[in-house]
Image: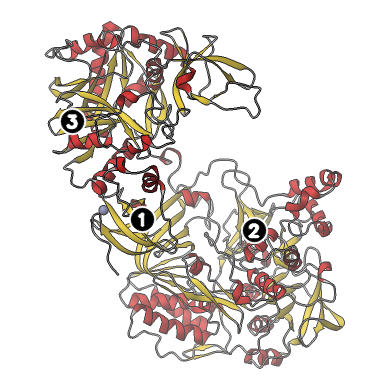
Amino acid sequence: MFIITCPFCGERDQSEFSAGGEAHIVRPKQPTELSDDEWADFLFMRKNIKGVQFERWNHAHGCRKWFNVIRDTSNDKIHAVYKMGEKPPSD
Amino acid sequence: MSENFRSSETKFLDKTNRISFKYNGKKYYGYKGDTLASALLSNGVHLIGRSFKYHRPRGIMTCGSEEPNAIVQIGGSGSFTEPNVRATEQEIYEGLEASSQNCWPSVEFDVGGINNFISPVIPAGFYYKTFMWPKKLWYSLYEPAIRMSAGLGKSPTQPDPELYDHNHLHCDVLVVGGGISGILAASISADNGNNTVLIDDKNSLGGSTIFQDDENFKIDDEIPSVWLNNQIKNIKNKKNLIIKHRTSLAAYHSYNYLLARENLADHKSLDERSNKLRQRLWKIRAKKVILATGAIERPLIFNNNDRPGVMLANSVKKYIDYFGVRCGNKNVIFTNNDSAYETAISLNKKGINVTIVDIRNNSSSILVKNAKNAGIKIYWNHTVVDTKGYRRIKSIQIMKMSDDGTNVIGSKINLVCDNLSISGGWTPMVHLFTQSGGKLKFRDSDQVFLPNTAMSDQISIGSCNGDFELDDVIKNTNSECKNFLSASVTDYDSLTISCPKQKESKNIWLLPNDKPLGKTKPFLDFQNDSTAKDIKLAMREGFKSIEHVKRYTTTGMGTDQGKLANMHALGIISETAGVKMGSLGTTTFRPPYTPLTFGTIVGRNVGTFFDIIRKTPIHEWHENHKAKFENVGQWKRAWYYPKNNESMHQAVQRESKAARESAGILDASTLGKIDIKGTDASEFLNRVYTNAWSKLAIGKCRYGLMLNEDGMVYDDGVTTRLEENHYVMTTTTGGAANVLSKLEDYLQTEWPELDVWLTSVTDHYATASICGPNSKNILKKLFPKLEFNDENFPHMSFKNAELNGINCRIMRISFTGEHSYEINIESKYGKSLWENCIEAGKEFNITPYGTETMHLLRAEKGFIIVGQDTDGTMTPIDLQMEWIISKKKYDFIGKRSLYRSDTMREDRKHLVGLLTDNPREILEEGAQIVQDEKKQPIEMLGHVTSSYFSPNLNKSIALAVVKNGKKLKGQKLLVPMKDKTINVTVSDFVFFDSKNERLNA
Ligand SMILES: [Zn+2]
């Protein structure tokens, strides 16, 4: 059970959060222009990396805000937390 | 009168406090401070139980949590009984009752003992291979024997009456283990201003140093036990140090999150513990963790090394030095290292006969010299090849070893003994370290795994870190803690320590024997009865991974997780496979470190506290009117209201007729309600629902269908435009939280430019839904100022109103097909609103109805229930709801998916109606639908989703999803049941008032 630093509330127990899958998958602005394959790629395809992964988390039992987390899935080490719309820290 | 084995005075027991207890029905005495094991040993009782597979007699081996054999049933047969308690940890109390496990009819004469004699046919993997055996023998002999003897202990048959608790604890530094290194670490930590918690699983601190009285060991010119005792007194006064006794660490998770079980009552007699907590689970979050979990002595692996009376040497020392109990009158110590000589010297000093068998050629340690000077006979370069004695060891046979240690030579020497103390060196307890994600390294010199890289802010100190000498333990603990806690000076910087050093070492995982391996029983896992030959057999059969060998032989899979001999198993595997020991790795150590009771895990979350229960503000009224309730998510919803012993069917038929003939009233408070505000609210609704919302006039309501991005129906409900930029959305009862979370997701991540604010108001309003031809008349009585004609207050519109001065929102919407109103009022007035409705409706026979009738009425109308008639694979087109998909809107959630090749398939499952050929026959929900029963394999076309007997149509009706259903209208299908096949015809799914005339009636 790890600790996540919510960008709005600070350090909180993992049990207050819910995971939202891979980050930085943008919903296409013009879905009708996409082929079935392109749409399926957006809809279904996720990386599921063993290692450093960019993820979305929601402070579900807190401020209800969504934000991004860079987490190593092999050891749960969290490298960075940043708000929606922000660019991931470069290092 | 049996012999008393309590041979010396000890300061650790309260001799004035004599305690009686029962073991296997017989009364014994011990003293306050005794464990069940020490008290039994003081009475000369060694035989405790029978082993799991072969039912061999087994005795007490150790003095701690690693005990594999001495596990007992505590308490009688009632609710207080507990199986698998380690006698070495259970403190005795007045009236304690304990009994042996895994033996029938008694531990002295155990029928299962036959397994021991048929053991040549129960090798490793026996249970996997069993069905290959001749059937006849299996049924007549093996199975009955195994069934009679299977399982460890008895579980209680009544609910646990005791209280358990959970508690959170946050600290700067958590020290695990109250031996000398843990005590020093806690002291250093507290002195440096850290809020420190020290936990230890025993009733007093001190580990094995607290009974170290040997004069060859000195700390600042004091013998260690005296010096340490002063340190313990000292730390008890430290303000920022909390010491928790009888608290064992169960799990060490990442980010220094740890679970510990504090035992508050198990050492007390039953009347002392009434109405008090039994155990507490501490959920600890520590900034830093110091592990001082110590080391466990290794056994030696030789033929018949499991008899009662075979014990670990250091445990024998604890029994004599700490508890004052001798484990035998004629002791043999069998060792491969110097530490067992401490036991020999302790016994010798107390006048107890002792002989030593050492597999080494010699040792130059002071301890060995002292043993020699005391006149103790030592057999160098010898090994034990056999032991005798069924219920207690009687003698051993030893032989000289060849120079390379692989063989025995010469003739056998017989030694009579009643105790065999064995020592194979020490294994650092790295279980918790690895649980936390730490990686181990292997030290070749003494064949131990040690902590290497840790995943969280922690260190391991003392013998769990591989320091086995007193001076190393103290000096390294001091320096490592200073470093870890950034302390500049400590009380222990300039201690002078003297201690005998470990000298010559020799390690042989499986000791040689004069007999072939197949004819011997060298036990590795005493609880699960796996032997060295099982390991070798598994490897011959092709198992290579240690995880596979473990599971095949069940080595290390008992309640003790093989704490004693996992290392030997690894050693034998690596030797047999010819690979280096360190390269194999270890098996995974999983939590809990020692078993936890279910009570501790669950804490207070039992009975009514098991899950959250949500009740509507009108709940009390339903209870007073004898409603039956059903669970909908966490909600308790009125299901139906039986009158005069009505069955459910009778009640629902009555309620359904009343609602259509005059008036019915439903508590709809549980429906999810989301308040939506903002200048972009209309645009937002356009994007989340399939239909168009921009043109919805203020004061109007609209039904909406919400899809997932994959095009499947996710939720539905009616949304009302209260003001220009203010809507209230209703969702299904079960979907409320998920819908809000999904909408927030889109708002925050995909469309942050939209000015929209969402608030859950489900609990803020209570809702009474009144339907039926007389609903208008009832509303007129309640709201005399309001005009209820169809022009002023048409279907799908909303009005603000007042009831006795309290604001209400009235929506004219219908889920039953009847002329119908939903009245929303602030929750606290909910019950009053309901009572007003009932009062006003009396003259119209207003009938309260529950969820079952609601479901029936909407099924008559063919209205779906998301989650019942849909299952996450239904598009709106599948539901024949094309009318709700806006053609004009460029995009909405899920739109693109409706044009994927799979969602456009013509032969998907569609929602249809089903009518049984026999109108009295009611289909079962979930029943499968087929066309041709004879076709093989039989083709499943779909299933029944909703089914009722309609009192208003006087026939059975059902909704179903059926492959290609739209094209099957009018066709005959079959619903095969267990004892018959029901003939059905596919129909339209609107069964009642298909022209919607009753809405405006
Ligand atoms: Zn937050």
| Label 3 element class | loop
Q: How is the image coloured?
A: secondary structure
The amino acid type of the residue labelled 2 equals Ile
Q: Horizontal placement of B730 versus B10: left or right?
A: left
Q: Residue at x 28, y 62 (%)?
A: A88
Q: Is residue A16 visible?
A: yes
Which quadrant would the N terminus of chain B be assigned to in this image?
bottom right
Residue matched to label 1: A14
What is the chain identity of the residue bearing mark 2? B
Residue matched to label 3: B694
The amino acid type of the residue labelled 3 equals Ser
Q: Which label lies toward us, 3 or 2?
A: 3
What is the chain identity of the residue bearing mark 1? A
The amino acid type of the residue labelled 1 equals Gln
Residue A4 spot, x, y in % from top left: 32, 59
B568 and B282: which one is in front?
Answer: B568
Q: Which label lies toward us, 2 or 1?
A: 1
CA separation in Å, label 2 and label 1: 37 Å
| Quadrant in which residue B196 is drawn | bottom left
Q: Is residue B710 above or below residue B787?
A: below
Q: Residues within 10 Å of mark 2 (few under 14, many from 20)?
A: many
Q: Which label lies toward us, 1 or 3?
A: 3
Residue B147 spot, x, y in % from top left: 74, 46
Q: Which mark is residue B71?
A: 2
CA separation in Å, label 1 and label 3: 40 Å
Q: Horizontal placement of B164 versus B501: left or right?
A: left
| Quadrant in which residue B622 is drawn | top left
